[in-house]
Image (cartoon, rainbow, N blue to C red):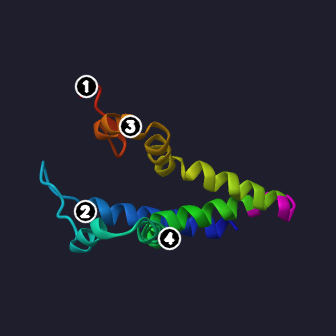
Amino acid sequence: MNVLLLVLGLLLIAVAARQWRGRPNGEAEPPTPKWMGALDGFTPVKAGGAGVVLSALNPKNLLLAVAGAAAIAQTGISTGQQIGSYAIFVLIASLGVAAPVFVYFAFGARARPLLDRCGPGWCRTTP
């Protein structure tokens, strides 16, 4: 099990190094992939499906999910407890995506100014 965790850690470092080298220099904006233009015309069901597929195919997400499952599996707890633990892991890991969705549905039109101020990993304090 420790070898698996070591391999997963090394894979994460390799993915991070690849992304670091591929980032734009200075203030340059990274180019938007052409396929993202098609997302504007998606229905909610198609958008949800695309989100699941893109999340599942993301190497970082996949490696973190496998590492979480491996860590839970080596605890020696029962299968039911492992399933419950992994469900909690998935819930906590999903909070970053789920929080803006919750704000949108909970606050309706009042959510727009708040969500417009906030981006991935940051929020401006002034509108």
From mark 1 to mark 4, how far is it between C-alphas?
35 Å
* Residue type (three-letter) at the residue carrying disc 3: Ala
The residue that disc 1 covers is 126
Sequence order check, earlier mark of 4 and 3: 4
Q: x, y percentage for residue 5? A: 61, 64
The residue that disc 2 covers is 21
From mark 2 to mark 3, how far is it between C-alphas?
36 Å
The residue that disc 4 covers is 56
Dot 4: few (<14), some (14–19), or many (≥20) neighbours within 10 Å? few
| Residue placed most toward the observer, 99 or 17 | 99
| Residue placed most toward the observer, 74 or 43 | 43
The magenta span reads 73-80
- Tag in front: 2 or 4: 4
- Left or right for 58, reference 7: left
Secondary structure beneath dot 4 equals: helix
- Tag in front: 1 or 4: 1
The residue that disc 3 covers is 111
Q: Residue at x 34, y 38 (%)?
A: 122
